[in-house]
Image (cartoon, helix red, strand yellow):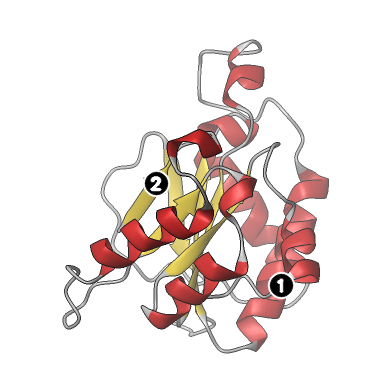
Amino acid sequence: MVFQFPYFNSSVFDNDAQFVGRLKAFFLRLPKVGPYRFAVEIRNNFWLKPRLLDLLRENNVALVLQDQSWMPRPEELFEKRDPITADFAYVRLLGDRKGIEQLTQVWNKTIIDRTVELQSWVTVCEKIQKRGLIQYIYANNHFSGFGPATVNYFRSLCKAKGIDTPLNVQLPKIIEGALFDMSGSSN
């Protein structure tokens, strides 16, 4: 389950400690057993601080690694600090909603070539996979125009580097995007 926190300015909280405090109280109410996995998506670079990452690690909640223009690029996250906060990773290839909607309103083909960005994500995901972590990769239509095509292209880039990307989760009919498990298993 992904908990999304949209962009909000820091005036909502006096400091990041207040935000982390509220999140900590919320985490106390989450189930500790069962097949549950949780991830937090922060859409404001201001909140990506060690205090938040430590809280996520303490609760085995993944920080969503995302591709949006106003958020740090994946390599930048790893250069500054370790963004892996759980025993799995969750990547969301979201793109620029406003930008792509100026180009299309039909989500059935690739509109923007995102090869460079996807190659960067392949490198990051390869590092994560070497740590033995399961990764869930999601591609929104707004990333390049058609989520399933983005996932297929990403998988082909992985395959070219010898990285296995098995599709071993049962998915509902997906219209907006596509999700797959990059666990490294052969299922």
Residue linked to disc 1: 81
Q: Position of residue 24 (x, y in %)?
A: 33, 67
Query: Which of 173 and 33 lies nearest the eye of the viewer?
Result: 33
Q: Residue at x 20, y 69 (%)?
A: 30
Query: In terms of secondary structure, where does tag 1 sit?
Result: loop
Q: Amino acid at mark 2?
A: Gln
| In the rendered image, the vertical position of residue 58 relative to residue 146, given as above or below | below
Which of these two is toward me, 10 or 130? 10
157 left or right of 7 in image: right
Image x and y of residue 108, in percent: 52, 26
State the mark number for residue 4. 2
Q: Quadrant of residue 10?
A: top right
Image point (74%, 52%), residue name: 73
Q: In the rendering, at what x and y percent does residue 118 appear?
A: 73, 52
Earlier in the chain: of badge 2 and badge 1, it is 2
- State the image coordinates of residue 75 (x, y, percent, origin top left): 78, 62
Q: Secondary structure at mark 2?
A: strand
Quarter location, residue 34: bottom left
Give the CA distance from mark 2 to mark 1.
21 Å
* Residue 160 is at least partly visible in this image: no
- The residue under the point 42% across, 55% down is 18
Report the number of discs: 2
In the shown orientation, is residue 117 left or right of residue 182? right
Measured along the vertical axis of the image, is residue 2 above or below residue 112? below
Say which quarter of the image contains residue 12.
top left
